[in-house]
Image (tube, rainbow, N blue to C red):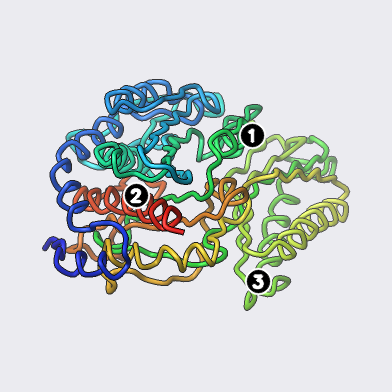
Amino acid sequence: MRIPTIVLSLCLAAVAHGQSDYGSVASAAEAIDGKVVEWRRHVHQYPELSNREFKTAEYIADHLRTLGMEVRTGVAHTGVVGILKGELPGPTVALRADIDALPVTERANLPFASKATGTYRGDTVGVMHACGHDTHVAMLMGAAQLLSERKAELPGTVVFLFQPAEEGAPVGEEGGAELMVKEGVLRDYDVEAAFGIHINSQTPVGHVNYKPGGMMAAANRFEITVKGKQAHGSTPWAGIDPITVAAQIVTGLQLIVSRQSELTKEAVVISLGVIEGGVRNNIIPEAVTMIGTIRTLDEDMKQEVFERIRATATNIAEASGASAEVTIDKGYPVTYNDPDMTQRMLPTVQSTLGEDNVHLVNAITGAEDFSYFALEVPSVFYFLGGMSPDMDRSEAPGHHTPDFVIDEEGLKYGVQLYTNLALDYLRSEHGK
């Protein structure tokens, strides 16, 4: 079953809100839906890793140029910025989509499945849009077309931010939203507000989730290197075993979450994704390295967790005669939805999707570098449904997995939402 566009209710809402003609935007999005799906499938079939999105950027830039707008390329390495200046005076609003893929080998049985490979941390890996950034690209390309067609009635400027490296720049490189901000994409065009959308594979098509304030967690990569003393595996007493010390540290880190963090205040997550050490079964190695992620939603709690990780690792290591070095990266800040802007744009979201399909939700421990745009200007970040309504949520493949899939029926709603957010914001500011 597909969710129909309720044209009458949208038009009535448009009159009440005094802004976009939602029915007209919905019809226009429906008319180009085939193109949007085609764009999405192309980007999905030819994914590229962070800071390496050269062909993806070229594909986007070519489309924007056909719309007659000013286009900047090479922003934050591989980012693309489109500038659409309306024929009426007004403020500037930014719409953002991320464009990079992940080091994941696709397992979904799709005719346009990715066969691409790339290099990640020195290894050859499969590359896949396992988080839906391909849909973000296509939806924003669609919104760019709809807004370009309304240039004569546009009171102000729309800046389209096609951002690279949301999943994180390669080690030793800068990238992502932070670098785009540093290079002046908001300042250069006097951007006053920004909006972002993320597809969600476990939310039904036609639905949107939002939350004022902290929407997504801060994320910090950490690395712990345990140094012991190498010895033969038959005589462990002759060395200091960093593997057993690392095992104790793993347990200790989870005690920070379960016994030392005030979880009734905000969530805390500490997860290890890499443990490396040793080369042979009968050699106790000299060192073990552990790499993981920290997720927090409160700044004070974040700093406390950092201190506890350092203390836990170093004290456990010292108790066994080993040592532990802890580094914690700067990471991403909390993705913060400006409460006033969230409330102000809520009628637009409800009019676009239908009030019953817009849901206030709790914060999640995923992270997003859209947070850097939100540090600079009032911003709102939304989650858009990408799961087939016929699918059981418990069976829907999660993000960052080889089986990740999106129901393309949801793309037209993203096109509409991007378009209406820009139109309503500009028109409400123009009317002041």
Residue shown at 40% from the left, 25% from the top? 70
In contact (CB < 8 Å): disc 1 and disc 3:
no
Q: Is residue 203 above or below residue 277?
A: below
Which amino acid lies under the numbered mark 1 shown in the image of this protein?
Lys
| Distance from the alpha carbon under mark 1 to that under mark 3 | 38 Å
Q: Position of residue 315 (x, y in %)?
A: 85, 56
Amino acid type at circle 3 is Ser
Tag 3 or tag 1, which sits nearer the N-term?
Answer: 1
Residue 233 appears left or right of 134: right
Q: Is residue 187 above or below residue 70?
A: below
- As measured in the structure, the alpha-carbon distance from the residue carrying label 3 to the one carrying label 2 is 40 Å
**Which of the two marks, 3 or 2, is nearer to us in this view?**
2
Circle 3 is placed at which residue position? Answer: 258
1 or 3: mark nearer the eye:
1
Task: Name the mark on residue 26.
Answer: none
The crowd level at tag 1 (other Cα within 10 Å; few <14, some 14-19, many 20+) is few
Q: Which residue is mark 2?
A: 418
Q: Residues within 10 Å of mark 3 (few under 14, many from 20)?
A: few
Instruction: Please name the residue shown 81% across and 45% down the image.
Output: 324
Q: Is residue 330 left or right of residue 85?
A: right
- Of the 4 image quadrants, the one containing the N terminus is bottom left
Q: Is residue 337 left or right of residue 230?
A: left
Q: Position of residue 304 (x, y in %)?
A: 77, 62
Which of marks 2 and 1 precedes in the sequence?
1
Query: Residue 3: horizontal and vertical position, in percent?
Result: 16, 63
Helix, strand or loop under label 1: helix
Residue ID for mark 1: 182
Q: Nearer the viewer, residue 135 or 420?
A: 420
**Res 47 → quadrant:** top left
CB under 8 Å between discs 3 and 2 = no
